[in-house]
Image: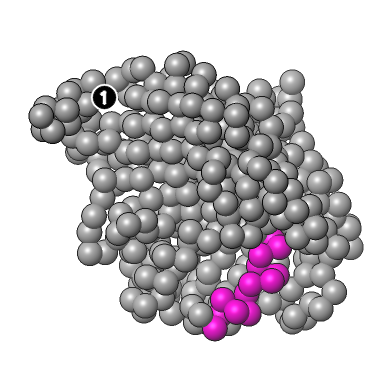
Amino acid sequence: MATGQNIGQICLKEIASVWQVDDAAIERVEQGFDWRPGSHLVRVRAFPNERPGTQNRWRVSVETDFLTSVPIEDTKFINLIATSCSMTSTYSMQYPPAEVLKKYEEYVGETTRTLSLFSSVYVSPEMVQWLPQFFAREALIQVTNAEIQSVISSEIFGGKPDFLPSGKNNSPDNILEVVNEVYAPQGKNQSRWQDTEEFVKFAETYGRSDGCFGIGDKSGLTLETPFGDSSALIRLRSEVKHPQLGSGLLVTVQIPFTAEEVAKEVAWLNFLEARQWTDFPQLGCWQIHNNELAHASFVPNALYSDGLATNFALWSIARARWLRQTRWPNLEDKPMIEILKNRYSATT
């Protein structure tokens, strides 16, 4: 089992190994390395938790430069990003909200008007044997998509591709072909999460408490966790296909939140998760779903492993709890049994 002193290095080495990085294409920095597989800079970092007694837990992140000079104050831009996030689902699209930029731009300058692709995980000793490898394979999607989507995205969202000083690379690293040549073909098959017992077992183990109610079958899992007088809805579904990756596992968290500025809330939450220590992975993106606030993560067939759905369910519950406590700290959560009783009474 890894110790707190080497978990970060183990993660960095595992990511570099999975990506088959060429030493000539990377620059080692104090907390990780920068990688240049194509036209965009990729930043890989590992930081320990500095709270006493928690040094064995590390936050490992991958951030890929995507667009620069984006119009972050433009309502059209804010709404486009919030509604387009559903196309990502394995990473977030994040940029500094205008309120943040106004406060700090005189210190950090125009370079902060950037849209980047971001994902992260939190690795403890019991997860170091599998999570870094999974994360490297999942994060490869964001690196690949930056390469193939930045030009067209700049035309849609505004700004311009955030290329390296050398400009557009017409011969990117061959590892960026894995998504198209391995992940997508495996996605043409039935979801590997179909007919699993994991959903039912999770509902039986975790879905009968004041903090979580759940129902599962062999195709998916539905959970509810308190959110004031109502509940956040969490779903794990194996029948939904990703437009790029095909079959796999879709994980969504829907929040009972409606507001005129929900798109701004999407921007805030993707920004906060990229900068705060949350203790749950950011392997997806906050977005607008049916005019409400939602988060979505997608795991392609190629990354299937037993127990992964359980982890994503637990992470989703943690995300809903974090959101309630962070954005609505004065809201009092009712037990799930009371929420369900009130809901049933209202319909009879």
| Main SS category, magenta section | helix
Q: In the image, 155: left or right of 23?
A: left
Which residue is drawn at the image coordinates 88% and 57% (left, top)? 23
Q: Amino acid at mark 1?
A: Met
Location of residue 161 with respect to 21 vertically, above or below: below
Q: Quadrant of residue 343?
A: top left
Q: Is residue 202 above or below residue 163?
A: above
In the rendered image, residue 280, in percent from the top left (x then y), is placed at 51, 37
Choose top left, top right, bottom left or bottom right for residue 223.
Answer: top left
x then y, percent, for residue 26: 81, 60
Q: Between residues 5 and 122, which one lies in front from this camera angle?
A: 122
Q: Sort mark 1 into few (<14), some (14-19) or many (20+) by Cα contacts within 10 Å.
A: many
Q: Is residue 134 magenta?
A: no
Tell me if 250 is positioned left or right of 223 in this view: right
Q: Secondary structure at mark 1?
A: helix
Residue position marked by numbered label 1 in the rendering: 336
Residue 148 visible: yes
Magenta includes 153?
yes
Q: How many marks?
A: 1
Split into 4 quadrants, where in the image is the N terminus? top right
Magenta stretch: give its range. Answer: 143-155
* Nearer the observer, 332 or 177: 177
Q: Report if residue 335 is visible in the image.
A: no
Residue at left offset 44%, top offset 22%:
203
Q: Position of residue 150 (x, y in %)?
A: 62, 74
